[in-house]
Image (spheres, grey):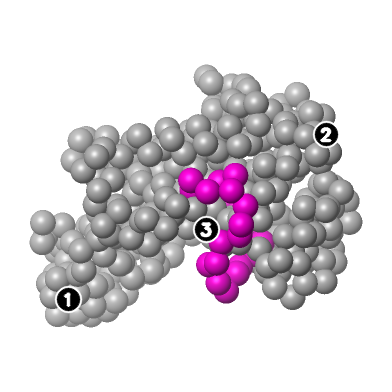
Amino acid sequence: MLLGVGGNNGRGRSGRPTPRTLIILDPSRMVAILSSLSQGLVARMLATWFQGHPMVLLTPSVGDRWVAVRRRTRKWTDAKMFDWLQKEIASINTPKFHLVDGPLAHEQAEMVRSAALDVPPSYKDFVIQFGNAKLYRQGSVYLVQVYAVPDEAESREGEPLVHFGRTDLGLAYFKESRLVAGQESPIFEWTGPEGGFRKAAEGFEEWITKKCKAARRQFGRERWSSILKGPKPFTEEELAVVEARKRFRWQVVGVAENGDLQFEVHNGSDLTLPYLTIGVRGKHGRVQGGVWLPVSHIRPGQSAVVEKDCYRSHLAPEDVEAFNEPDPEPEDREEYWEFQALQ
């Protein structure tokens, strides 16, 4: 079991590492089609909950999970256990602050409820109402996450575990030995070598409620008000920056003596930008983050080689995969350093 740790490629106004540079360390994810699964908890869950339903989508995860079910609508169920979260999501006008799949279709919800699986009822109810959930975005990190399809895991002592979610500080599990059909089960968290593996809550509902309250407290009153209102639209200058970064081209061309990656960057735009934001991840899926290439010296029409530390303390150069980040939206201003010249 591994835990996310902060990176050091960028710093916010406070001088602390920005969330953008967080490295997410997670157990590697198995990617398979349903018919290839034959044993284990995940196999039983997938086969029992979703077999034979064309709405199921098994794909490689974007972050640290499978996307199990995608709903086309956002009409909530009648369940009241997590009504407070439904209301909070509905009140927020910052689109990416909470990301949830939405409720399961009726027939799938019934399959989850009646499945012969020992995961706690409150966890099943959450999956029925929200599917996969990434809650409380802070920078590029979500402070609370719940997976619609959990993973098998084990402790350092070899005890079987069920990995169902995480926070920004730890990974959350059920102990398989404590699971009883129709009953709640204690939650245990791994918070790193110092924090260790410890009991975090008596049940899933208590855990998700407590973690969401703690996450919300990280946003002050002014910041929370802006999240409720939603971001301001891009200005004309910001839209020009968005268009300009689309015309930048880059490729990895080598490795410096100190282990930094070397990027050849071409500025095909009409602007000079201070930075170019790109994504970085480990080829084995255990590290994910982003870096900002300093490109202020690359004028329109010019090319140059830029060297950048891409988590060399965690990844060997040959294990690094760099990729294009999507175009920024108004709520992404702080994550894309291309806008720094306008601040």
Q: Amino acid at mark 1?
A: Ala
Residue plotted at (52% across, 36% down): 209
Closest to the observer: 241 or 7? 241
Q: Earlier in the sequence, mark 2 or mark 3?
A: 3
Mark 2 residue type: Val
Please give the name of the residue rendered at 89% of the width and 56% of the height, measured from the top-left corner: 38
Is 63 situated left or right of 89 in this image? right
**Residue 3 to residue 336: above or below:** above
Give the side of residue 318 with respect to residue 338, left or right.
right
In this rendering, the count of numbered labels is 3
Q: Quadrant of residue 313?
A: top left
Q: Are marks 2 and 1 in contact (CB under 8 Å)?
A: no
Q: Which residue is mark 3?
A: 100
Q: Position of residue 157 (x, y in %)?
A: 75, 24
* Residue 224 in picture, x, y percent from top left: 28, 45
Q: Which residue is pictured at 62% across the width and 21% down the height?
A: 198
Residue 236 lies, in percent from the top left, at: 13, 75
Left or right: 184 in relation to 38: left
Crowding near the residue tagged with mark 2, few <14, some 14–19, many ≥20 C-alpha atoms within 10 Å: few
Dot 2 and dot 3 residues touching (CB under 8 Å) = no
| Disc 3 from disc 1: Cα separation | 31 Å
* Residue 308 seen in this snapshot: no
Q: Amino acid at mark 3?
A: Val
In the displayed structure, would residue 202 be above or below residue 42?
above
Magenta residues span: 64-85
Asked whether 70 or 1 is in front, the reply is 70
Q: Which residue is mark 2?
A: 180
Q: Which mark is on residue 229?
A: none
- Residue named by callout 1: 240
